[in-house]
Amino acid sequence: MAEHNTEDAVPTVIADELHIVYRVHGAKTGKGSATAALSRIVKRGEERGVRKVHAVKGVSFVAYRGEAIGLIGSNGSGKSTLLRAIAGLLPAESGKVYTNGQPSLLGVNAALMNDLTGERNVILGGLAMGMSREEIRERYQSIVDFSGINEKGDFITLPMRTYSSGMAARLRFSIAAAKDHDVLMIDEALATGDRKFQKRSEERIRELRKEAGTVFLVSHNNKSIRDTCDRVLWLERGELRMDGPTEEVLKEYEKFTGK
């Protein structure tokens, strides 16, 4: 575990020997399948046709206020699962996650409502994050401007289904970044959009850190991690392989991947 030398540092997230296990149920069809399913439920034993995926294995770390922490690792290494557990969206199989304040998870696939306009989604997204209608009104124009989606037309008044994936991702990030967060978790949000938007995003993350929040960033873009984060957690096959200063961890990771 990385050392944190600041005596008055405030912990925001503590993971203590955290294990997350998914159970994937195979589809059952045919005569008697409902009866068999009920029998398995009643027995509460190990079910036939259920595959366990041990996605996070004994991960422990402490995150502090003011840190920006990158999460790196191969596909399927448990990065997104770990964020979902910190956000309270996945139960622990064993171990614990403690958070100081309200964690907010922003993913490229975060649900916005495709049939509603961008304008309505800004309002609903702000309300979902706990902002008042007055706060949303005050910040509305800056959210739209930050996203850049109106630079080539009045897209904010069109349904989300008309947006490209990059436009939708930029709007999601802009909504989330409009609020100061205790713990903000970003899953690949900086991988979309042009370099100009990425620079704005990185600058906003630095501002969020100064405003006493903690930021977690999952990204396959090592440059984004270098530009944004001062600490990195490297997960591989669900295990925490390394936790330390950004450059030290990325050097080892790049040796491992050959990139």
Image (tube, rainbow, N blue to C red):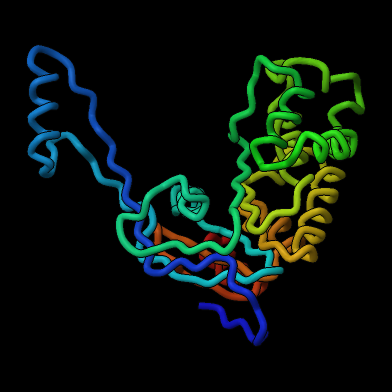
Q: Which of 159 and 108 is in front in this view?
A: 159
Query: From the viewer's perspective, is 46 left or right of 64?
Result: left
Residue shown at the point (53%, 62%) measured from the top left = 99
Front-lying residue, 99 or 217: 99
Q: In this view, does 29 lie above or below 177?
A: above
Position of residue 239 relative to residue 139, above or below, is below
Across and down, in percent, residue 170 comes to: 75, 36
Image position of 61 (left or right of 251)? left
Q: Can residue 147 be seen by looking at this rendering?
A: no
x and y, in percent, of residue 47 in the image? 13, 38
Residue 114 at x, y = what percent? 65, 19
Residue 198 place in picture, x, y as percent: 80, 47
Whether residue 183 is visible to the viewer of this picture, yes or no, is yes
- Residue at left offset 41%, top offset 66%: 59
Within the image, what quadrant is residue 145 found in?
top right
**Would residue 111 be found to the left or right of residue 46 on screen?**
right
Q: How many marks are shown on the rendered structure?
A: 0
| In the foreground, 227 or 88 | 88
Residue at screen point 63% across, 37% down: 108
* Quarter assignment of residue 135: top right
Give the vertical position of 6 relative to 203 (above or below). below
Viewer-side residue, 224 vs 55: 55
Instruction: Give the quarter of the figure containing the C terminus.
Output: bottom right
* Residue ranking furthest to the top: 31
Q: In which quarter of the image is residue 243?
A: bottom right
User: Could you tell me which residue is drawn at 91 percent across and 23 percent down?
Assistant: 152
